[in-house]
Image: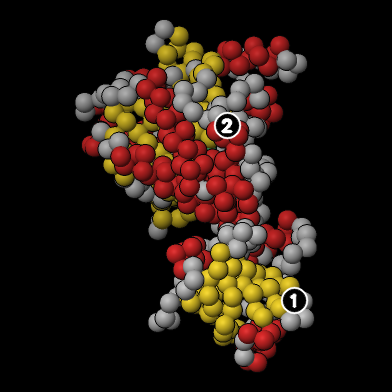
Amino acid sequence: MIPNLCMIRDVSAGVGQRVTIGCWLYNKRSSGKIQFLQLRDGTGFMQAVVVRNEVSDETWEAASRLTQESSFYVTGTIREDARSAIGYEMSVEELKIIQIAEPYPITPKEHGVDFLMDHRHLWIRSPRQRAILAIRARIIRAIRQFLDERGFVLVDPPILTPSSAEGTTNLFHTKYFDQDAYLTQSGQLYMEAAAMALGRVYSFGPTFRAERSKTRRHLIEFWMVEPEMAFVDHEENMRIQEQLVSHIVRSVLDDCSAELAALGRDVSKLEKVTAPFPRITYDEAVRFLQENGHEFSWGEDFGAPHETAIAQTFEKPVFITEYPTAIKAFYMKPKPERPAVVLCADLIAPEGYGEIIGGSQRIDDPELLAQRFDEHRLPRETYQWYLDLRRYGTVPHSGFGLGLERTVAWICGLEHVRETIAFPRLLYRLYP
Ligand code: 4AD
Ligand code: MG
């Protein structure tokens, strides 16, 4: 055990004290008799100052030998320093090298995206990537807090499944001994079973889609939180979603101001994200697009440019409701007085970040659900268990899926979802 080992995150408690930090060298400046070491220890960044005539020859030499990403223990006194980004600095007394790093491939100069993606295992050490991953973790905590406090029970659906939940075009196929299996696209169908057992439930885990689309919003492996609620209708479903999303944004604003600043995020835009959110119907969205010069007819699905055009007229996320039945998933409940549309909503983030939530009220009538299996050519044997949920005490129920990476991209203000997860799985990228 190292005596008085301290993390950069906690240095404010160590002012005036002699502490040791285990760290890596992020950057170094030197002016003859003083060396300024930029330390990083995973919890933060901080400057340590080595003064020639205040340290031993060994410590001075050790500091001189440090290369970028060399690992070491540094011991010294913490001082307040108004000029420092974190408000503190260390006056170095002693420095013990763990390893002098080989020439580090990622230097402070600009690198291309492919190079950085090939070195993702090192790239995540940079201040910007650290900030994103810290915000991602805070978002996950905010989601769990929100749902746990409201009595939602966490249930974990399987990853290996015999069937599809969201259409058969982008399924990942694998063998399950001598049967065919697929990696889960969504835990929803299982969460519906769980909601009938536990009332209000949620799952939170990785989902997989073999999407051939190479866009800045698609990952092959992404994380989704999927709440499912018995006795909740379409309207209440949207109310819960807007409360969840505003809670997420508030939590990040309150707890991650340093990270948002490191990313240069315009927080005034996030401050506006408070419930309730505006709602427009699919019909209204179509009319808006047609009146604003888009070629678009009723019955088509929105592409990214359409979503962006609609979202740009709002400062908050916007619900687009009641899509045509024909373009939505088989399990969505038709609107009773107009069965050509379903009781669903997509939540579109502001600033062009696209759909972050897809949700709906589910079909509760066994006959209609069985009819949908036939229309969508879904084998009855595979989905028999799902039909059972409507045969033994069916109830109105609703749920939604929030895509974690798109939410992180929006809140962090990122160009591309590839930076929102530590090791993204992208079309044509499985390394590292
Ligand atoms: O709209 P989706 O396909 O809905 C479902 O899967 C439902 N079964 C959810 C439910 O009701 N329980 O996906 C939900 C969200 C999208 O709004 C989007 O944020 C995200 O998941 N998403 C993706 N994120 C990254 N990469 C992809 N390829 C994504 N596909 C969907
Ligand atoms: Mg969707």
> Which residue is painted at 64% across and 32% down in the image?
351
CA neighbours of label 1 inside 10 A, class few (<14), some (14 to 19), many (20+)? few
Nearer the viewer's eye, disc 2 or disc 1? 1
Q: Nearer the viewer, residue 214 or 113?
A: 113
> Which residue is painted at 44% across and 64% down in the image?
13
Asked if the residues shown at circle 2 and circle 1 are in contact, with their CB atoms under 8 angstroms apart, the answer is no
Residue underneath mark 2: 349
Question: Residue 51: horizontal and vertical position, in percent?
Answer: 67, 81
Question: Residue 413: horizontal and vertical position, in percent?
Answer: 63, 42
Of helix, strand and loop, which one carries label 2?
A: strand
> Which residue is painted at 46% across and 26% down in the image?
275
Locate the C terminus and report the quarter of the image it occupies. bottom right
Instruction: Decide: is 12 above or below 389.
Output: below
Q: Nearer the viewer, residue 307 or 389?
A: 307
Of helix, strand and loop, which one carries label 1?
A: strand
> Which residue is painted at 31% across and 44% down in the image?
154
Give whichever of discs 2 and 1 has the lower sequence position. Answer: 1
Residue underneath mark 1: 30
